[in-house]
Structures are given as structure tokens and as C-alpha cells.
Amino acid sequence: MKHLFFGGIHPNERKELSSGDTLKMELSPSQAVISMSQHIGVPCSPLVKPGDMVKKGQKIGDGEGLCVPVHASVSGRVTAVEPRPHPGGRNIMAVVIENDFKDTLDDTMVPNPDYTKLENEEIIKMIREAGIVGMGGATFSTNVKVLSSVEKTNTLIANACECEPYITADDTLLRMNPDQVLEGMKIIRHVLKPERTVLAIEDNKKEAIEILKYKLENEKGIELCVLPTRYPQGAEKQLIQAVTGREVGSGQLPSSVGCAVFNVSTFAAVYKAVCLGLPVTERIVTVTGEGVKNPGNFSVRIGTSYEELVKASGGLNDNVWKVLSGGPMMGVAQKDLQTPIIKGTNAVLCLSQAQNGESDTQTCIRCGKCLTVCPMRLQPLYMYCYEKTKNVKALEQLHIMDCIECGCCAYECPGKLRLVETFRNAKQLVKEAKSK
Amino acid sequence: MNFVVTSSPHVRSKNNTNRIMLDVVIALLPALIVGIVRFGLRALTVSLVSVIAALAAEWICGKIIYHQNTAADGSAAVTGLLLAMTLPATVPYWIAALGSAFAIIIIKGLCGGLGRNIFNPALAARAFLMIFWPAWLIRYAAPGTVIPVMGSTVDVVTTATPLHHMQMPALPEVSILDAFLGKTGGTIGEVCTLALLAGGAYLIYRGVISVRIPGAYLATVALLSLVFYKGEDPVAWMLYSLLSGGVVLGALFMATDYATSPVTPGGQLIYGIGCGALTVLFRYYGLFPEGVTYAILLMNAFAWAIDVHTAPRCFGWKKGGTA
């Protein structure tokens, strides 16, 4: 089938591991570790201290600038406010809550079943107060994105591509709770008033597509756009290109081409915040991979440790090789299971040794495969050369800062070069040279 | 419990350097088999000597230059086999061995190894052998003669290749069909165009090479020989130009060498056209009837420069480099 963006790859999908089951409701954890940094930007400052009693949904961290609040995902007593492991790799300030299993609800936020009566400013404020970020994994503050898209959007896109292999969290959401997504889309449409509202999904999610087709039969104004499965179609710039044919300029925002893209789970969170008055305290997480016994999708409280979640999935197999936060293409490898789930965690992926395609020796044979799969049309092989010689000027000329680190080049590379890692270093070199 | 922590991506395609090299060897097998059928067992023994010498040279380079054993990656074996393809079956074994050693040590090893050489090792070795021992490289056994596997081949009755006729200029004596099927004089690997095309089709099917370089190369040779034909029949002249000598072997297996050819789509077309034009030029005005080796070697030198000037327009940038 014709693909609609540059380059890209189609790795083994492996979605069948986790997609069959229905959503598993997870018991709440005995302890929730709520990280103060669950979004891009300034981390929150804790609003509680050890010994405080908190309710479920109570705001326990907030800050100024590019920052959205975090909330308690369980009710109970704060036992510690201290740096704790974070999926990003470093230890980051977190509030630790001991669960009293009462789920006493905080009622600061009020439900607004009829959002059409609300002003734009009110809705955007609710989105912020509910702590909503890009739930597909990008974790950019949703209120900022909405605000910067007002009066600039002619195409609103709901991203249901979930193009990373293995992950089926968005798929599960669409199969189980499609109305949450569609209602959320209508709320944002009400704010942005686009000419076109599109729900973009890849053609490997057959059941979800059937359900959406049925739901959208009587729904005016929301188009279902079924795209041929190809990674990284769910990347913002690639999705805009696939849906509208427009190219977002280097360093520009989607609003520069009249587009606004949100993940479907972000829309569901918007619906819950505005209509039900619920902040982000839980999300759907896919626990999957050849390294875990019973893969599936779980409704998980924010702050649950990977360990508890993996236990609920039957535990790890002996052959486990890596545990990732996110998908196999862009996920972050975890050193142990102490990490807590944060708002952007769409998957806990346990890969087995059999998936280990890495090599001790790396040699570029100049085959040029990287060039043909790069969705940004960069030249990875030359970027690799110039990082090795620390040639910052050449790296800039090759537009290294436009690299989205999707990993297509490294996936295809027959020489097994560590391209993405090299490009992260190269970007750092360019940034350092600029700041001098 | 601690897990492996390395950078994304965490899954890789099954494709690897060994598999690519194996694919090239597989693609060369039909041409090699025709060579053995056509020239006898010596075609096989010359190829084996060439491959073994290349592997030995690679092992030595691994010890002295790279400090790791690279003989297993298969690239040296491919170089040895490619060199053998460009040699007549009558060459002494030491010529094949020396050529392989030159290719691996001087041309590739001193540049830093796999992927870093500027010139195609097999063709550079052939050019080197042509300088010192030209007489051995143009001794093509006449049809029906038996080339002894062991001992001297000095007494083997030799024949002119179609290219010799074309240099006069005159159309060759063999029919176009015989030239296509390989019933003619030439080197071990170049005579059977059908076998080479089958191998090339396999490489394109496997995604090892794209059609751009060989397509542009062969189309340029076809066009130029059609326009600047000699004799009476332009179409026959064009067909003999394509089917004689090493142009198909060169276009499919030599010009497509990763390390020494451009990677950008536009660059590959320019490079193929350049190879084709130079091949025709050297054939028409050069001292030797064949020009493929020198055409490709000359274009090798421009590969990186062509890449620089044919960089694709990046996503989100206008042509010329503004956002």
C-alpha cells in the first residue's frame, strides 16, 4: 500500500500479544510514588509534607511557567517527599503516599456535563488543573498546546496510530471507551473551531475501526482516516503529512500549518476532566513482551511501581533481557522495576533475549538504507561520520537538530550502528557549540 | 534484578552485513557456474584461490590494522570472488592471489577497512594487474579448448573477444543470442549476460541494491552506443556493446559497491550515467578494448562529492536550505 509520509519502516507488530484481552481493572497499589516531573518543562514543587493526609484527586504538586499540577492517585498518608527513580533514568523529587484503600475523593474540581456553556478560558484552565499532558508519551502540557492553537487550527487531528510495535493501550481505550475519546474531541473542537476534525488510525486496529465506524455513523463532522500501518506514522509531523500532505517547517509548530494533534488518550482525559471533574490519576498501560507471563492492558493508578504491575501480569519470564518504559523503538530501558508509572507511560515492555539484535561490533558499510527510511529525509550515515569527528558545522548543515530520534535508521542498519545514541550526543555537541 | 540498559531502538531488523555479503555471493553463483561450464574446472579453482587469498589477506589486516577478526563478515570473500569474475580462466594462480591481496591490503585495509575504501577493491586490483601483467589478463581461451587445472596455461589456444572486433571497429562474429548466453570469449564472470541479469534481479528483489545505478549505467551505454554507432546497424551495435565485455557485470556488481558509490537517489543516477559515459568513451578512444574498470574507478573518486551535491531536501526545509 502507498505510504503517505517520507521513509518509515514496518517492524514486526507483535500487538497480538496484548491486544486480545479486555481492559483489566487493577487494584490500587499499596504505595503510590507520584513524580513531580511528569511533563515537559518545569517540575512541580510538592504542596504536601510527610504526615499529611491526602484524598484521591487532590493536587499535591504544582509550579509556575511551563508546568501542570500532579494529583494524588490514592487516598492516604504522605510518608515521604524525596527523590525517587523516574522512567527517564534519574532520581527525581516525588511524593510517596501510603494507600488507605478508602479512595476518599477530593471534590475541588466540579463536573460540567454541558461543556458548550463554558468559555474557552474556563475549559483551558480545567485542562491545566486536571494535570493533562500529551498522554501518548510526549507529555507536553495540553493546556499550552490548546491555547497556542486557538484561532490557528483548521484541522484537528486525533492520533490513534499507536505505531510503536507491541503497544495496544490506545487500541484498548478505543475498543472499550470510544465515547470518552469522541466526547473529548468534541470539547477541543468546541474550543478550536477547526474546519476539519479527523480521527487518524492505522489499519491494523480492525476491531477499533469497526467500532468507530459504527459510532461515527450518526456523528457529523468527525472523519475517520484509516492509514496504512507504518512506523513512525504517529509522530506529530509525520501524521500531519500523512493526513493533510502539509510539511511542518523545521523548528515550527503544527499550528504554523493550521494543525493541532492530540493523542486519543489525551482526549479521553479532557473528557474526564471537563465533564466528570476528574484529574489525571490513572491511565491505560500495556504490559507486554516475550519477557512477561500474561501480557495485557491495565487501568493503572499513576505512581504504581512497575514491580506491582508486572506481578499483576503473572511476573517476568526467566529470559527477560530489557524492561522498557514505552515501545521498542523509542522507549527508555529501565535498570530495575522500582520505577513508577507516570502520565506518559503507555507501556511496560519486557523484551526477551530473543529480541536482542544488538552487536558488539559496528561497521558502516555505506549501504544507504538509513537514508531511505529516515522520515525527516536526513542522511544518518553522514551524521554518524561527523559525530565521530566532532564536526559541529557539518552536523548543523546536515540538519541534525531535525532528527526526531525515531530509530528507523538504527532499526534498518545492517552494520548495527548505535545511530540514535550517536545523534543524541551530536545534538548535545551542537547545543554546546551554540551556547558558547 | 538488573536489566540491560542501552539506547533505543531496542529491536533491530534481521538484516545484517553477513546476510548482504551472502546475497552478493548467491547472486554471483549463476555467472560463476556458467564460467565453469564454459571454461572448465580452472574457472572454479582460480575463483577459489582468489577468495582464499582475500580471506587470508583480511585475516592479516585484522591482526595488524583493525585489531579484530573481520574475515568472518564476508566482505573479503566477496572481493575475492568479484576479482576472479574479472579474470580470464587462464591466469596463473599467483596472479589471482596477488590481486586479492592487493585489493584487501592496499586498497581496503590501508583506508581503514570495510566501508572506508575510496576505490572498488576488486577493480583496483584488476587495474593493478593490468599495469604489470597485461598479457596474462587478455588471454581468453578459444571455445572448445581445455584449460589445464594444474600447470602452465601458456599453450592454451586463445581467441579474440567480441570487444576486440568492436575495437576495429566491426561487429563480432558471435550471434547476439550466443553473446547473451555466454558462448563467447571473455573473463570467468562476464560472458553470460543472462546469468548476470538473474543475479542482479535477485539483489534488487532482496533490496541489496537499487535499480538506479545499474539502470542509469546500462541505459547510458545503450543510448550512447545507439547514437554514436559504428558500422551499418545501430541497434546491433548497441546490443553488442551491452552484451560484450564487462559492462553488465560492472553495472550490477561493481558500480553498486556500497563503499565506493553515492547513497543519495539523485547521486546514484548521476554516478550511473557517469560510469556509462566513461565506459563508452574509454572503449572508443582507449588503448584497451574494455573501459569498464577505469570508468568505475574514476567515478569512485567522485562518490562522496556527488553525495554532497545531491543531498535530498530535508523534511520541513525548502530547497536551498531555508525552513
Image (spheres, coloured by chain):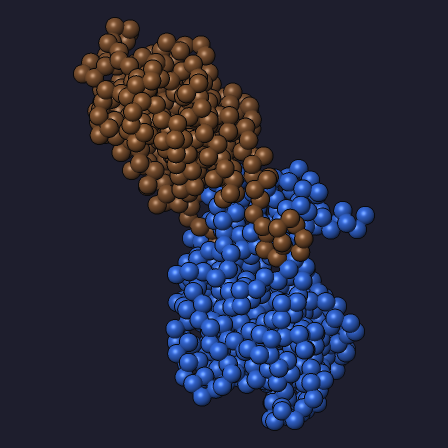
Image location (x, y in percent) of residue B91: 33, 13
Drawing shade for chain A:
blue
Left or right position of A78 against A267:
right
Image position of B11 with respect to B212: above or below: below
* Quadrant (top left, top right, bottom left, bottom right) of the N terminus of chain B: bottom right
At which x and y percent is residue A411?
Answer: 49, 51
Image position of A228 with respect to B241: above or below? below
Q: Residue at x 42, y 48 (%)?
A: B14
**Looking at the picture, how far across and down is residue A167, in whole percent?**
48, 67
* Residue A170 against residue B123 in the figure, above or below: below
Direction front: furthest residue: B232
Q: Which chain is brown?
A: B
Give the residue drawn at x 44%, y 71%. A226
Q: Nearer the viewer, residue A146 or A334?
A: A146
Residue A42 appearing in the image:
yes
Corner quadrant of residue A336: bottom right
B71 or B204, which is in the foreground? B204
Identify the residue shown where x is 68% and y is 78%. A150
User: Relative to residue A75, is residue A203 drawn left or right?
Assistant: left
